[in-house]
Amino acid sequence: MIDHCGNSALMSNAGAALSTIRHAADYNQLEAFLREYTNVPKLSRDGLGYTAAFIDLNGDGTSEALVRLSGNVWCGSGGCTSLVLSREGRSYRVISKITITQLPIRVLQTSHHGWRDLGVTVAGGGIGPSYEAALAFDGHTYRGNPSVPPAKMLTEVTGRILIGEDETVRKLVATPAGASN
């Protein structure tokens, strides 16, 4: 049963509703992690936000979170910081912190060490013409700067956009006093 308003169904028929509930839970847990990671209560919260996508990057059946932070603390002339996060119980752990990412960010068809490659746009910050770079997993992490090797400039851009320029940026706010994560 999903609620008391006549919106119950057999689990086999409630896929869309269950997906919505799981999606909300994913965002709640992600925001709790991000509040701690970014020290939101200690920072000026003006403009601090994030955009996220959930995708199974390593084929283990559990979605990782790809998060692009935004705001003056996390962005500069070359772009913003992005995180690749793996589930750890009811929270997350950082797999990679990737600086100077511009949009779009995509998942590529290729993979290394069992993890799908990521494509990020490199532009600004003194970079000449913009381009997309492939970031490969090295067995432990995705390297942190897409403008230097081992990141590789893509000659053909393929893959599915995970975070695009038209995505809604969610505001990250401190947990109200007395509330729990």
Image: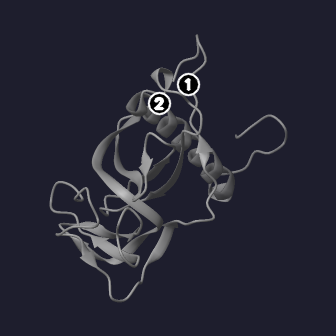
- Relative placement, left or right, of 164 versus 74 is right
Q: Quadrant of residue 170?
A: top right
Colour mapping used in the image: one colour
- Point out the image quarter for the N terminus: top right
Q: Earlier in the sequence, mark 1 or mark 2?
A: 2
Does dot 1 land on a helix, a strand or a loop?
loop
- Relative placement, left or right, of 22 versus 99 is right
Residue nearest the viewer, comparing 159 with 58: 159
Disc assigned to residue 38: none
Amino acid identity at mark 1? Ala
> Is 125 rendered above or below residue 176?
below
Does dot 2 land on a helix, a strand or a loop?
helix
Can residue 63 be seen here? The reply is: no
Q: CA distance from mark 1 to mark 2?
A: 7 Å
Q: What residue sits 63% from the left and 64% below the top?
A: 166
Can residue 130 be seen here? The reply is: yes
Residue at the spot of label 2: 35
Which percent across, then down, holds residue 76?
Answer: 42, 51
Disc assigned to residue 174: 1
> Is 154 rendered above or below residue 122?
below
